[in-house]
Image: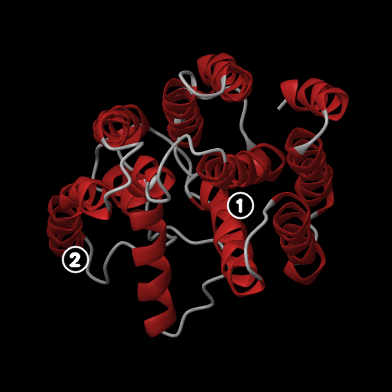
Amino acid sequence: MVVLPVLTLWGIFVGGQWSVDLASAMLLSLVSFADDRWGLPIFVRFPFHVLAAFLFVWLAVPVPPAWRGILVILIVWSTNLFNFMDGCDGLAGGMAVIGFAVYATAAWPGDRLFSLGCLAASGAAAGFLFLNFHPARVFLGDSGAIPLGYLFAVWGVAGVLKGLWSPLFPAVVLAPFWVDATVTLVRRVFRGEAFWKPHRSHYYQRLIQIGWGHRRTALVWYGVMVVFGLVALLFYRSTNPVGSLLAFCLIPPIVAALRYLDRRCSGHFEIGCDVTSRPVGNDGSPPFA
């Protein structure tokens, strides 16, 4: 994203946590741009994802060592999450607009500088979304999706450290993304597939394949994201884990909808939706890479 270098310089000027996470995001953006341009193998680009997560956790997160490894794994997962879900015009960009706006809203009463940083990310994503909504004229690519996923994770952790929200708050805000991506990944692993390779078996991709198209799929996902964001805001400062866990009562209906889509997809295609030789939806969109 064009705004990332400006935010990075601002973060270095402000110092503290900002200089660590924004500089790391800039590093990821440069590596991901090289991947977009020249197609770097996974064993070249993935260590940078781990390095960026490691730098943030070890330099900016004062937690016991036992928790640091877990945080690195979660940040690396989130770093790749936006990239996994960037297969529909406007989907990942819309999630960035909504997700960072929810962060900004929750942070405003306690830390207005942090809130403005989140709002800047949301605003940058909104400007991008004007050209990325279907029919898309520009695309995130790895150089846009990877830094977004990273910043969403590290700012989620930073908000917890600042006492702005509970640890479950970021997970609830991003639930529509991580539920789809995690369930899809687990399914592919159990099927013995090369899960690190491009595919078309995410649930949002299946909606496109059964005829919803990019526009309708994105709009429905926006609605789901807004619902989860509003629920997250109800419990964002709750110190009672029961209060935060109530937000997850929305997940079973989502899982039920995914199971229904599995059955619908299996009936639509002879071998399910994970095929690359069939057209994608009814809007003339090209197949996913």
Residue 203 vs residue 189: left or right? left
Residue under the image location 57 percent in, 48 percent down: 83
Of residue 9 and residue 149, the one placed in the foreground of this image is 9
Residue under the image location 81 percent in, 24 percent down: 14
Q: Is residue 252 above or below residue 232?
A: below
Residue 234 vs residue 47: left or right? left
What color scheme is it? secondary structure
Residue type (three-letter) at the residue carrying disc 1: Thr
Mark 2, residue position = 266
Q: Are marks 2 and 1 in contact (CB under 8 Å)?
A: no
Helix, strand or loop status at disc 2: helix
Q: Which quarter of the figure has residue 170?
A: top left
Percent x, y for residue 219?
30, 27
Circle 1 packing at 10 Å, graded few (<14), some (14-19), many (20+), is many
Looking at the image, is mark 2 or mark 1 nearer the viewer? 1
Percent x, y for residue 186?
39, 74
Of residue 194 and residue 168, the one placed in the foreground of this image is 168
* Image quadrant occupied by the N terminus: top right
Helix, strand or loop status at disc 1: helix
Mark 1, residue position = 79
Identify the disc placed on residue 224: none
Residue under the image location 83 percent in, 31 percent down: 15
Percent x, y for residue 287?
47, 48
Task: Give me the C-alpha separation between circle 2 and circle 1.
Answer: 31 Å
| Residue 274 appearing in the image | no
| Residue 192 appearing in the image | yes
Residue type (three-letter) at the residue carrying disc 2: Ser
Residue 77 vs residue 14: left or right? left
Percent x, y for residue 26?
80, 38
Residue under the image location 40 percent in, 49 percent down: 171
